[in-house]
Amino acid sequence: MSLFGVLRKLPSFNAIHCHINFLGRIARQQPYSMYQPFVKEPTYSIEKLDQLIESGEAKKREFVPVKAARSDHNVSVFHDELTSKFINMVMEKGHKEVATKLVETAYMKIKQMQLAKYYKATTDAERAEIELNPIVIFHKALENCKPVLQLTPIKRGGATYQVPIPITENRARFLAMKWMILESREKERTVHFPERLAYELLEAFNNTGKVVKRKQDLHKQCETNRAYAHYRWG
């Protein structure tokens, strides 16, 4: 057979490209895994475990194989998804164990300080107002630190204006965590990071402190530049 005949029998470039795309779609729909489809995901949350026991699902899954737990799975009483994200932001150079220990130590400090206030209270009404759960304090503190607006530079007519725009939920949470970590690291040598973080979280829980002031300053700047708000749609 001549060379021309061999080349005519080879598939075209378009056919090869379409075949590769088809295989890529199949791979995305059915990703490779070392586990069979019947292997269950691990349940490490204490609340979800209690729900499985109450519903009777735990009895059915006694002899069902379970996937290996990931390194970020944690059964600590101080663990939740938001705390895990905060630990990842505290972490430096991949030292996650150190970051986890720092955040948990800060939670323990918060618990100790709140218990001291609780036992010093003389009436039941005062004790009812004191929050003892560090996780609840952490969530409320971040909620008080989330900004509603942010400034973005927009160029119009050769000039750059700082235009206030609404901020997304993820960006607001990121800024609140970032400000909390920055303020906790600006400390004296005699004050360690967990202690400073505990103080900042308690102040933010009461809607006071440096992090809340940062949010208020940002809102004041947005209020000052409200005349440029129409540039957002330009």
Image (cartoon, rainbow, N blue to C red):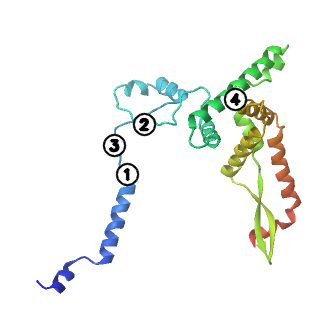
Q: Are marks 3 and 2 in contact (CB under 8 Å)?
A: no
Residue occupying image coordinates x 73% and y 45%: 176
Q: Position of residue 175 (x, y in %)?
A: 72, 48
Depth check, mark 1 against mark 3: the one in front is 3
Specify few, some or many for label 2: CA neighbours under 10 Å numbering under 14, 14-19, or 20 or more. Answer: few
Depth check, mark 2 against mark 4: the one in front is 4
Amino acid type shown at disc 4:
Ala
Determine the CA span between mark 2 and mark 4. Answer: 31 Å
Amino acid type shown at disc 3:
Met
Determine the CA span between mark 1 and mark 3. Answer: 10 Å
Q: Are marks 4 and 1 in contact (CB under 8 Å)?
A: no
Determine the CA span between mark 4 and mark 1. Answer: 40 Å
Q: Where is mark 3, residue-wise?
A: 34
Quick one: label 3 or label 4, which is nearer the N terminus? 3
Q: Where is mark 4, residue-wise?
A: 106
Between residue 142 and residue 7, name the one nearer to us: 7
Q: Where is mark 2, residue-wise?
A: 41
Between residue 171 and residue 37, name the one nearer to us: 171
Quick one: label 4 or label 1, which is nearer the N terminus? 1
Residue occupying image coordinates x 67% and y 27%: 105
Amino acid type shown at disc 1:
Pro
Q: Secondary structure at mark 3?
A: loop
Depth check, mark 3 against mark 4: the one in front is 4
Quick one: label 2 or label 4, which is nearer the N terminus? 2
Q: Secondary structure at mark 1?
A: loop
Looking at the rendered image, the quarter that the N terminus falls into is bottom left
